[in-house]
């Protein structure tokens, strides 16, 4: 090897194969990794096709959080000559010398790499910062494809709820956590980790359900006054949802509530979100007086009013946006709120469907 890259590394071993972890300056990424512009058939590459739409999003994350962004390691295979020169004091610490004629194939992290390169164009000072790269010896296309599969197939995706629980940059996530935490009933029965609740879960709602509803309530408006409104809105909802109060007073059980009523279904929370949006846009309406009308709603699953709104003909809950609108229409009627033209049109379509 006449000319080489030299990286201080730590050597490790997995499945009887050596790998090396290096801290690589960001400005070197464009030299090490080839452009992703050329199209290659899936069977002849070891990565998914680059999703161009993700790059600006990740790049913006870096630039907007210049003092606090964080990335996990990239994984790459070395297709070419290299050697590890061990230190005399610690055998697994040393220098990895890689021929400049070698090629580097990304097994995991192509979107991070491309976003970093885009961010560097706007802020070259990023160049001296580093990212860890785990280097493997390239043993051919089949092994590189297997590395990609293993890294991604066995990764556990975090739930939306736990992401929103920990996210301090997303203003709505912060507000949702605070609002739920301040309302005893919601705090008691909201699972803050899972997105899907089991049949025998001790919780009735997920944090993600309220996060999604809150985004619908506030829309594109400023979050400046959102926390105060959302706290008042959900407090009033809790006060006037009859079955929620019955559970709180131990008059019914969670099993009874789940099996015989739809009042805790995620789609109902989204429908309440539509009501919340209307009230947020009309601050002249008194929340408590208006939402008292929720006490008149018949939440029984068996109620005919929910057929093809919340419950399909097979008895299953409908979870699409149209269902949220149609459920909200029933709520608006009970709250003496007007329907929009789209909502009236949806009612006519539903009436026609039910008459066929």
Image (tube, grey):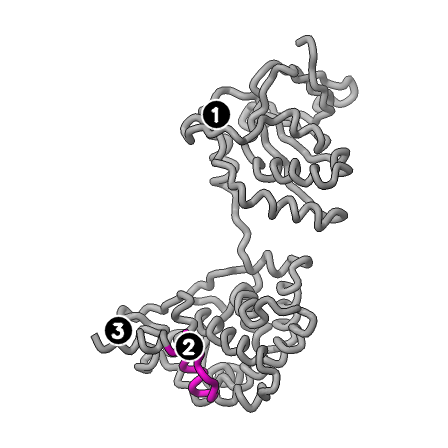
Badge 1: how crowded within 10 Å, few (<14), some, or many (20+)?
some
Q: Residue at x 47, y 61 (%)?
A: 196
Assess whether mark 2 and mark 3 are in contact (beta carbons under 8 angstroms): no
Badge 3: how crowded within 10 Å, few (<14), some, or many (20+)?
few
Does the image show residue 250? no
The residue singled out by tag 3 in the image is: 353
Q: Report if residue 133 lies within the magenta region.
A: no
- Residue 169 sits above or below residue 21 on the image: below
Q: Residue at x 44, y 78 (%)?
A: 340
- Point out the frontmost of discs 1 and 2: 2
- Residue 257 sits above or below residue 6 on the image: below
| Image side of residue 295 versus residue 229, left or right | left
The residue singled out by tag 2 in the image is: 341
Residue 346 placement (x, y as % from top left): 36, 74
Q: Quadrant of residue 315?
A: bottom left
Residue 93 placement (x, y as % from top left): 73, 24
Residue 13 placement (x, y as % from top left): 60, 26
Residue 120 placement (x, y as % from top left): 70, 37
Does the image show residue 230? yes
- Point out the frontmost of discs 3 and 1: 3
The residue singled out by tag 1 in the image is: 143
Of residues 246 and 32, the one drawn nearer to the viewer in this rendering? 32
- Residue 296 sits above or below residue 195 on the image: below
Q: Residue at x 60, y 17 (%)?
A: 102
- Secondary structure under tag 3 reads helix
- Secondary structure under tag 2 reads helix
What residue span does the magenta drawing correspond to? 328-344
Which quarter shows the C terminus?
bottom left
């Amino acid at each position: 090897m006449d000319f080489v890259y030299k990286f201080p590394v730590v050597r490790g071993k997995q499945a009887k194969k050596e790998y090396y972890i290096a801290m690589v300056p960001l400005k070197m990424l464009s030299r090490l990794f080839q452009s992703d512009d050329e199209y290659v058939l899936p069977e002849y590459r070891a990565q998914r096709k680059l999703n161009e739409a993700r790059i600006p999003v990740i790049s913006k994350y870096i630039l907007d959080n210049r003092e606090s962004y964080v990335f996990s390691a990239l994984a790459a295979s070395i297709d070419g000559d290299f050697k590890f020169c061990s230190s005399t004091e610690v055998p697994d610490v040393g220098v990895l010398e890689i021929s400049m004629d070698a090629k580097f194939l990304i097994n995991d992290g192509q979107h991070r790499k491309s976003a970093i390169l885009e961010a560097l164009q706007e802020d070259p000072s990023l160049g001296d910062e580093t990212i860890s790269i785990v280097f493997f010896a390239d043993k051919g296309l089949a092994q590189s494809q297997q590395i990609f599969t293993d890294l991604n197939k066995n990764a556990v995706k975090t739930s939306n709820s736990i992401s929103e629980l920990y996210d301090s940059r997303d203003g709505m996530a912060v507000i949702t956590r605070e609002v739920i935490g301040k309302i005893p009933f919601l705090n008691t029965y909201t699972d803050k980790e899972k997105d899907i609740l089991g049949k025998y879960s001790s919780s009735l709602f997920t944090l993600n359900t309220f996060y999604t509803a809150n985004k619908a309530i506030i829309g594109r408006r400023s979050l400046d006054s959102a926390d105060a409104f959302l706290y008042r809105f959900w407090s009033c909802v809790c006060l006037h949802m009859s079955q929620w109060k019955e559970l709180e007073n131990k008059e019914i059980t969670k099993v009874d509530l789940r099996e015989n009523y739809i009042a805790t279904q995620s789609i109902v929370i989204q429908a309440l979100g539509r009501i919340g949006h209307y009230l947020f846009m009309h601050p002249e309406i008194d929340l408590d007086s208006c939402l008292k009308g929720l006490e008149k709603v018949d939440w029984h699953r068996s109620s005919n009013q929910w057929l093809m709104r919340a419950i399909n003909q097979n008895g299953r809950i409908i979870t699409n946006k149209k269902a949220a609108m149609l459920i909200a229409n029933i709520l608006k009627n009970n709250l003496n709120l007007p329907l929009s033209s789209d909502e009236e049109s949806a009612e006519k379509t539903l009436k026609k469907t039910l008459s066929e």
